[in-house]
Amino acid sequence: LVGRNGAGKSTLLELLAGLERPTGGEVRVFGLDPVRDPVGARRRVGWMTDDMAVWNLPIDQHLRLLAPFYPTWDADLAASLLDRFELGAHRQIGALSKGEQTRARLVMTLAWRPELVLLAEPATGLDVPARRALLGTVLDVVRDGTRTVLISSHQVDDVERICDRVLLLERGLLAGDGTPAEVAGPGRTLEERLAESR
């Protein structure tokens, strides 16, 4: 999901997560209205933002508190992701760097294997190797094809590299939908197309 600042990316993700009410029309996620049936929709939608609420507890305690809320919680996946991200389970979340906190939030979002994963600027503030590792992990977790990931990002090079479908928003409207090359148009990069958008 790409677009200039103010194009509606964050609003769309919040609508899908049931955190905002539409001002017109309706929103459906797996046929469910996330406002009228928030429990049904949230059972299937994982949502991660940079300001996602976390408690200043050790990571493993945080995971133990979350697990009972998700029938599909996968403790083995959580442990595997902690290892992959080199996050010690006994470390306090408040003592982690910004990048480590982002990875910890991603573990919490992916460990229950939601069918739709919404990631709002998941790699903001990470250096290139850390961004690639984080996004590569997301791809590995969803590689079985039973889940969809919707990423809102200004990192257009990441989008071109990892996404098989791009939605371009302009002023709250869908202005492009297709592969990165299709949305960019002939002879242009996605970044060039985005620079021309309104």
Image (cartoon, grey):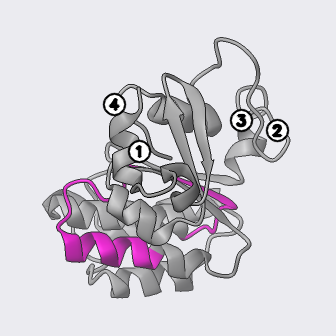
Q: Name the residue under label 1.
A: 193
Check if residue 1 falls in the magenta segment.
Answer: no
Which of marks 4 and 1 precedes in the sequence?
4
* Quarter of the figure with residue 161: bottom left
> What span is colored magenta in the figure?
111-137
Q: In which quarter of the image is residue 84?
A: bottom left
Residue 134 inside the magenta-drawn segment:
yes
Question: Pointers 4 and 2 in contact (CB under 8 A)?
Answer: no
Marks 2 and 3, how far apart in space? 8 Å
Q: Indicate the secondary structure of the residue bearing disc 2.
A: loop
Name the front one of labels 4 and 3: 4
Q: Earlier in the sequence, mark 4 or mark 2?
A: 4
Q: How far apart are marks 3 and 1 (CA)?
A: 36 Å
* C-alpha distance separating marks 2 and 1: 33 Å
Pointer 3 residue: 38
Q: In this view, does 36 lie to the left or right of 20?
A: right
Mark on residue 5? Answer: 4
Q: Position of residue 35 (x, y in %)?
A: 71, 27
Q: What residue type is labelled 3?
A: Pro
Amino acid type, callout 2: Leu
Q: How far apart are marks 1 and 4 (CA)?
A: 14 Å
Instruction: Locate residue 179, reporting x and y percent.
Output: 59, 60
